[in-house]
Image (spheres, rainbow, N blue to C red):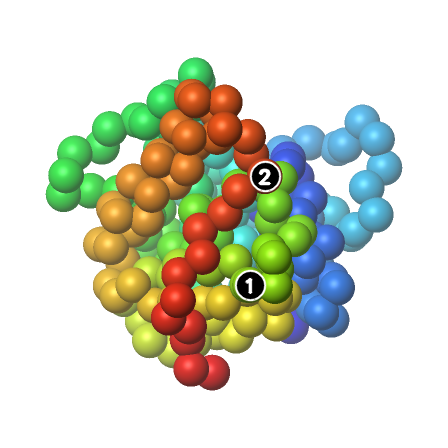
Amino acid sequence: MKIAVIGYGSVGKKFAELFCSVGYEVIVGLRSVPVNPIPYPHASFKEAAKAADMIALAIPFSACADVLPGIAEDSKGKVVIDSTNPLNPDWSPKLLGQEDSAGEEVSRLLPGAQVVKAFNTILADVMDKPVRDGQQITAFIAGDDDSAKHIVANLAAKIGYAPVDTGPLYTARYLESMAHLNIQIAVGQEGGTDAAFIYSQGWEI
């Protein structure tokens, strides 16, 4: 399976590394030609989305309204992993209202895709360390399509996480609040970004 990683910042780099480590083929989608070489095939956002079987978003939520319409056609029928969180430039929560979430907005921007919220509660600094003190970090997953969630859950399990299904895509609202809490502890209170959520209930693969 080929996965398009859309964006190559701190999350995109970890995604590419983790997916390749368990045998997935990766193509990185970039806005422009990289200044420095990267160790993965790369193309434009649109070309990467078109070439892939699955898409993983690794861009800021603030960029989604600009970027996603350009890959909407090429994401139709594909699983799209949404790892974004609604944040202001100072890392404070960007409030979308109690009846909306970044995940739901991504789904509206990609109406033909099977959007699954996942990995947004995991800080980039620990993303490549899925086991902490002998326990797997939890990968919370939300989506409206059960088969798409199983695909993402299997991917999460392969790279070392313990996936947990939180229900329909609207539960992304809760997951994004968890991410806001994580960032508040790590950044706002200087607790450090070397931390993660561990939930006792795992997914039955």
Can you identify the residue that label 1 sits on?
135
Of the image marks 2 and 1, the number of the one nearer the N terminus = 1
Residue at x-position 43% and y-position 47%: 121
> CA gap, disc 2 to disc 1?
14 Å
For residue 203, above or below residue 50: below
Of 107 and 75, the residue lying toward us: 107
CB within 8 Å, label 2 to label 1:
no
Q: Can residue 15 be seen by looking at this rendering?
A: no
Disc 1 residue type (three-letter): Gln
Is 52 placed left or right of 171 in the picture? Answer: right
Q: Residue furthest bottom?
A: 205
Is 120 placed left or right of 15 in the picture? Answer: left
| Disc 1 residue crowd, few under 14, some 14–19, many 20+, Cα 10 Å | few
Can you identify the residue that label 2 sits on?
194
Q: Residue furthest top?
A: 90
Of 71 and 184, the residue lying toward us: 184
Disc 2 residue type (three-letter): Asp
SS of the residue under disc 2: loop
Residue at x-position 14% and y-position 39%: 98
Residue at x-position 30% and y-position 26%: 94
Q: Residue 59: horizontal and vertical position, in percent?
A: 52, 38
Is 119 placed left or right of 167 in the picture? Answer: right
Of 153 and 5, the residue lying toward us: 153
Q: Residue 106: horizontal and vertical position, in percent?
A: 35, 46
Q: Residue 129: horizontal and vertical position, in percent?
A: 65, 53
